[in-house]
Amino acid sequence: RAGVPRLADGVAGGGERGRAPPPLRLRVIEECAEVGVPVGVNVAPIIPGLTDEEVPRILAAAAERGATSAGYTVLRLPGAVRELFEDWLDRHAPHRKSRVLKRMRALRGDDMNDTEFGVRMTGTRFWADTIDDLFSLGCKKHGLNGPSENLNTDAFRRRSGGQIGLFESDPEAF
């Protein structure tokens, strides 16, 4: 899945310096689909009160380019990340800071972080349900997350001699 956290280059774009802009991320989806590679979109992270309103448009744009599946993750703020995020909001979206933080607390409680398995990526309560409904309806509307086709693994070859290290290369491995 290709990650597309937003479509607009405006306010929400300030946190992604040095990363591919949305049009290039959508192009990855399109080019994979054109050559027959099953591809999906990951709408992440969704920032409640800032980027959640873009979810339907992201799903539509991804589906138009050939995505067949989708997933999402809602922002969580573990440890010192919360302070950094609040500072980021001060610089990039001061007019939305209050709304974003209220929704984050409503989703995740006062610490804005929930580590419980099954909810840490989506949150709980009203805003989590609202985002999930928005996402689910968008997927249904655009035919995302339907039955998936089985991938052909006939050409897959397991490397002899076990797994190599992350920074090693062994051209003779096969």
Image: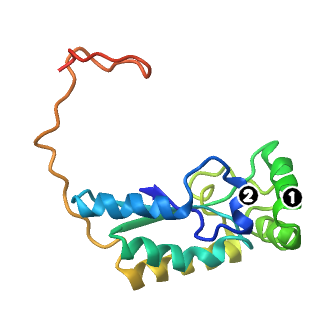
Q: Residue at x 32, y 70 (%)?
A: 66
Residue toward you, 26 or 56:
26
Q: How crowded is mark 2: few (under 14 residues within 10 Å), some or many (20 or more)?
A: few
What's the residue type where badge 1 is placed? Arg
Query: With respect to residue 130, does 12 lie above or below?
Result: above
Residue occupied by mark 2: 14
Quarter where residue 131 is shown: bottom right
In the image, is 125 to the left or to the right of 81? left
Image coordinates of residue 49 in percent, x first then y, are 74, 73
Quarter where residue 51 is shown: bottom right
In the image, is 67 to the left or to the right of 7? left
Check contact, mark 1 vs mark 2: CB within 8 A: yes
What's the residue type where badge 2 is placed? Gly
- Answer with mark 1 or mark 2, whichever residue precedes in sequence: 2
Query: With respect to residue 48, does 111 lie above or below?
Result: above
Question: Separation of disc 1 and disc 2 at Cα?
Answer: 9 Å
- At mark 1, the secondary structure is helix
Residue occupied by mark 1: 91
Image coordinates of residue 99 in percent, x first then y, are 83, 74
- At mark 2, the secondary structure is helix
